[in-house]
């Protein structure tokens, strides 16, 4: 099996309450930590990588994002999916070529632009279909639905978008920030794997597993927790330094 087919197989026929949990590495070192812990695959967060390189989310140059993903892929032997936001304005062929050059086996593609506005769902579905045609089975496409982030939050709109994207060839749908109370509606109405974002703790993962998530990711949550822990360590060291003077 290729790495992409291995990754796709991880999403199939998952038992209820047993989602695929994908930690989000932001650099090679964190990727090794997660792989050494035994996770079968990883999913990079665009915001986490951007922060690690000194950028705000949405402002990282594409060359730096692809280079960072390539370093992460080289650091581990498990499949890696990459969050590449809205595709950076690249044509489908170039986007697929650049992703495959990194060694990534999948990608997140969001249906908003400039981190403010939802795209027209039919035009976005057409674009996703072109990406699928260029990639064939070499990439697992996770179509992010941003209705709950930038739209009205209407579950019916999220479902309509999700169905268009699945019909266009998306392997999985990711309704970002969908509230728990609408999750059963989304699970029932979407034919295929469903990605939900959790807080990086056992309780959050268990709750989304109970609600029927096929796969769970964490966005930049793990990178932010790591930076918070580093900040606490720095503060303790600084206090100790002052006390010893």
Image (cartoon, rainbow, N blue to C red):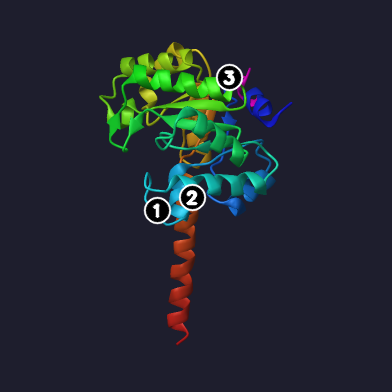
Quarter holding the N terminus is top right
Secondary structure predominantly adopted by residues drawn in magenta: loop
Label 2 environment density (alpha carbons within 10 Å; few <14, some 14–19, many ≥20): few
Q: Is residue 112 above or below residue 129?
A: below
What secondary structure is found at the residue carrying circle 3?
Answer: loop
Mark 1–mark 3 contact, CB under 8 Å?
A: no
Mark 2 or mark 1, whichever is nearer to me: 2
The residue nearer to you, when weighing 135 against 150, is: 135
- Magenta segment: does it hold 14? yes
Residue 9 is left or right of residue 92, and the answer is right
Would you say the residues marked 2 and 1 are in contact, meaning their CB atoms lie under 8 Å apart?
Answer: yes
Which residue is the site of mark 1? Answer: 55
Q: In this view, does 242 lie above or below 78?
A: below
Tag 1 secondary structure: loop
Which residue is found at the position 43% from the left and 34% from the top? 90
Front-lying residue, 48 or 168: 168
Q: Which residue is drawn at 46% across and 43% down?
A: 46
Marks 3/2: CA–CA distance? 38 Å
- Look at the picture and state if 19 lies above or below 220: above
Dividing the image into 4 quarters, which one contains the C terminus?
A: bottom left
Task: Provide the residue span drawn in magenta.
Answer: 10-16
Q: Name the residue under label 2.
A: 64
- Residue beneath disc 3: 16
Query: Residue 52: where, in percent of width, then height?
Result: 47, 54
The local crowd at label 3, few if under 14, some if 14 to 19, many if 20 or more residues have their Cα within 10 Å, is: few
Tell me the distance, in whole angstroms, between the alpha carbons under discs 2 and 1.
10 Å
Q: Can residue 25 be seen in this view?
A: no
Relative side of 146 to 223, left or right = left
């Amino acid at each position: 099996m290729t790495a992409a087919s291995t990754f796709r197989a991880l999403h199939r026929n998952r038992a209820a309450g047993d989602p695929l949990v994908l930690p989000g590495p932001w650099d090679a070192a964190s990727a090794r930590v997660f792989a050494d812990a035994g996770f079968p695959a990883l999913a990079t967060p665009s915001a986490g990588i951007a922060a690690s390189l000194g950028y705000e989310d949405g402002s990282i140059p594409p060359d730096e994002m692809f280079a960072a993903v390539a370093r992460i892929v080289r650091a581990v032997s498990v499949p890696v999916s990459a969050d590449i936001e809205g595709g950076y304005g690249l044509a489908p062929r170039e986007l697929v070529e650049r992703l495959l050059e990194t060694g990534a086996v999948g990608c997140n593609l969001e249906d908003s632009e400039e981190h403010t506005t939802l795209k027209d769902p039919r035009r976005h579905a057409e674009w996703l279909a072109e990406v699928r045609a260029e990639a064939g089975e070499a990439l697992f496409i996770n179509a992010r639905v941003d209705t709950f982030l930038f739209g009205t939050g209407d579950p019916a709109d999220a479902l309509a978008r999700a169905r268009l994207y699945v019909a266009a060839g998306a392997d999985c749908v990711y309704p970002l920030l969908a509230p728990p109370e609408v999750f059963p509606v989304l699970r029932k109405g979407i034919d295929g794997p469903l990605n939900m974002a959790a807080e990086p703790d056992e309780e959050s993962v268990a709750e989304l597993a109970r609600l029927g998530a096929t796969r769970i990711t964490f966005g930049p949550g793990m990178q932010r927790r790591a930076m918070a822990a580093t900040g606490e360590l720095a503060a303790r060291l600084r206090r100790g330094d002052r006390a010893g003077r």
